Amino acid sequence: MSALSDRKPDPAADLDPRVEAMVNELIGRVADKWTLLIIEVLIEHGELRFTRIADQVPGISQKMLTQTLRRMERDGLVIRTVHPVVPPKVEYRLTDLGSSLAEAFCGVWVWVEANLHRVETSRAAFDARPR
Amino acid sequence: MSALSDRKPDPAADLDPRVEAMVNELIGRVADKWTLLIIEVLIEHGELRFTRIADQVPGISQKMLTQTLRRMERDGLVIRTVHPVVPPKVEYRLTDLGSSLAEAFCGVWVWVEANLHRVETSRAAFDARPR
DNA sequence: ATGCTCACTCTCTTTTCGGTAAGTATAGAA
DNA sequence: TTCTATACTTACCGAAAAGAGAGTGAGCAT
């Protein structure tokens, strides 16, 4: 696995390595680009059906949309309601858990919007200086 | 590119498609697992040199550590200080921008720790029900 | 009969991620 | 002279993620 962290595998870390693994996994899952974007449109528009979400998330493929929504459902972030009609109609909305996550991410959205320019400037400066 | 969002490429979205692209890119970058973990240890320990960070981030490889630190430096999240000694000594610390990002992510960390159990329960329930 | 809608699902290909291992530079210590 | 420490860089490779695109089913309208 790791070649670097052999001297101090787990210094004054969290508590349980299993808990820490779960936390890292969840961070990775929840901080996923598509997940974030989907949460955003569901916050904005409330209950939406599959193709409406697709419309609101430019660039997402059908595959990624399905996959992400499934995972979110499994994690308890969205509720999937199937209306037994033809053609099919499936609606998605955030659960309370999903909403609370959206709230938690609010600070990140604000940060990104507020600091976009700063990051771009920093990148330009970095790229400009001689290597 | 996209096969889905052909009807409404950019509905009532942000403003500029270029801005939106940047926002999405930044979200993805900033929400990166290694970036997050490195930010955490730099918050906790202040200024750290390369191998110290490696010690604190179990499982990261040299390659990923270098790569992630370089990107963070480019984005203006960390400052890299090279001390011209032998053997080399390089120290990293968060910039104000990096600290503010850490703060913005604080809510997410709290959410994850508070809701780990809920997510696990939801997953178990999802996996248990017949497909 | 054919076409159409919607929400997928499947397959195939491309891209990215990430690990291992080796190499580099430098000066002081053994 | 060889070894050691540190912070990388480079090359290679397999695994995993993601994108494109075609296919599916079910019923209603034409």
Image (cartoon, coloured by chain):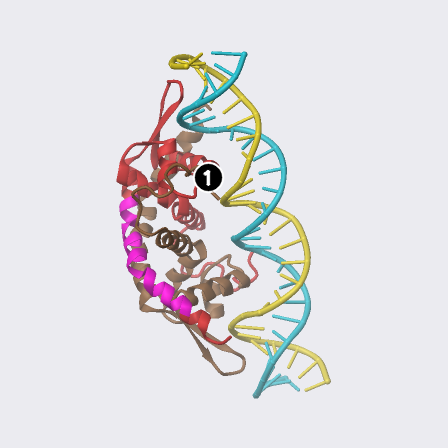
Chain colours: A red, B brown, C cyan, D yellow
The answer to whether residue B119 is above or below residue D5 is above
Which residue in the structure is indicated by mark 1? Answer: A61
The spot of residue A102 in percent (x, y) is: 29, 44
Magenta span contains residue B81: no
- Quarter containing the N terminus of chain A: bottom right
- B10 or B50: nearer the viewer: B10
- B25 or C21: nearer the viewer: B25
The spot of residue C17 in percent (x, y) is: 52, 53
B107 lies left or right of B33: left
- Asked whether residue A6 appears in the rendered view, the answer is no
The spot of residue C8 in percent (x, y) is: 46, 29
- C16 or A102: nearer the viewer: C16
The spot of residue C24 in percent (x, y) is: 64, 76
| Mark 1: secondary structure | loop
Stretch in magenta: A102-124
Label 1: few (<14), some (14–19) or many (≥20) C-alpha neighbours in 10 Å: some
Which residue occupies 54% across, 80% down? B87
Tell me the subunit letter for badge 1. A
Task: Kindly indicate the quadrant of the structure image that contains residue A11.
Answer: bottom left
- Asked whether residue A28 appears in the rendered view, the answer is yes
The answer to whether residue B4 is above or below residue B87 is above
- C7 or C24: nearer the viewer: C7
Which residue occupies 27% across, 50% down? A106
Magenta span contains residue A114: yes
Task: Kindly indicate the quadrant of the structure image that contains residue B8.
Answer: top left
The overriding secondary structure of the stretch rendered in magenta is helix
The answer to whether residue B85 is above or below residue B11 is below
A28 lies left or right of C17: left
Q: Amino acid at mark 1?
A: Ser
